[in-house]
Image: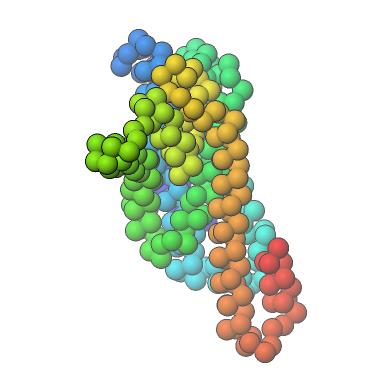
Amino acid sequence: GRNDFVTQCMILFPLLVVFVSAILYDEEVISTDTFTKNIVALAMYMFSFLMVPGLLAEFLIRERVTKLRTVLTVSGCDFRAYWLGSFLADFALLGIVAVACMVSWHAIGASDFYEEPETYFLLLFFNTHAIAFGYLCSYVFSDPKTCIFVTPTIILGLLLVPNIILGLVQLLFDQGLGLFSIAAEDFGGIALWMMALLTPHGSFFVGMLDASYDISSFINHAPPAYACIIIQIIQTALFCYIACYADSTSVQELHEQAFGEDFIDLNAQSLLQESEY
């Protein structure tokens, strides 16, 4: 099973952030402005999930490093059952945080969040998106501890990449060559689209921002909440497929080593056929 300490970190820290952000929002500690309060609350929740993909990936990497995944495969563990069980277990754990967040909206009277149906979908699909991203990251790293600490850095980098790229484009093609410039309103919209596409955290933040506040007055062409939900669903499916395909390849190699390339028993052959779907 998953390491208890890892599980506690993955659940308790976001829960603590939900509690603290609710107090800050309700008591108007940081600001009395609704937009500012929304930004702070969303940013706090988003950053509380920085460690989640890495912690999810750590468990899968550790299973492979300790050969537990090999034992499960040789013992006849069904390929689909392994991944479906992992996904449902992780979703149930993160669901605790999502439910706590929804309850906090109603408790503090954050009508900008609980009156919009899109926010509930964004919150739930953020969980599936983060889980799938974690599964993908599990095949990027070979060391569990490295994955835990490097993955948040990668996510932060991807969140900053849009502003860096657009800043360089502006610097080169506007101030440098004088060919064209990006208006401030359009700059924000392009940056938000890139954020939504690059990370689960970005798609959640941008979608919630659109659902909870009308930002069209100062940002043009920002991604609508429904577009961010579509991104969450598509990337969840894509990341899960890539992770499952990578795992199926390792399963096939394992059976070829165990039974020889010219001889694979009926059980192994059945497992390989299932993993191809």
- Can residue 89 be seen here? The reply is no
The answer to which image quadrant residue 205 occupies is top left
Q: Residue at x 50, y 50 (%)?
A: 133
Could you tell me residue 1's position as x and y percent? Answer: 52, 56
Please state the total of marks drawn on the protein image.
0
Could you tell me residue 189's position as x and y percent? Answer: 44, 30
Q: Is residue 196 left or right of residue 44?
A: right
The answer to which image quadrant residue 202 occupies is top left
- Can residue 139 be seen here? The reply is yes
- Name the colouring of the figure: rainbow
Q: Residue at x 45, y 48 (%)?
A: 53
Query: 82 above or below 98?
Result: below
Query: 42 above or below 172?
Result: above
Query: 102 above or below 247?
Result: above
Q: Is residue 25 left or right of residue 128?
A: left
Could you tell me residue 35's position as x and y percent? Answer: 40, 16
- Residue farthest along the top direction in this orientation: 32
Q: Residue at x 43, y 50 (%)?
A: 55
Out of 163 and 140, give the one closest to the viewer. Answer: 163
| Quadrant in the picture for the C terminus | bottom right
Q: Is residue 15 left or right of residue 178?
A: right
Q: Residue at x 48, y 28 (%)?
A: 222
Could you tell me residue 206's position as x and y percent? Answer: 47, 31
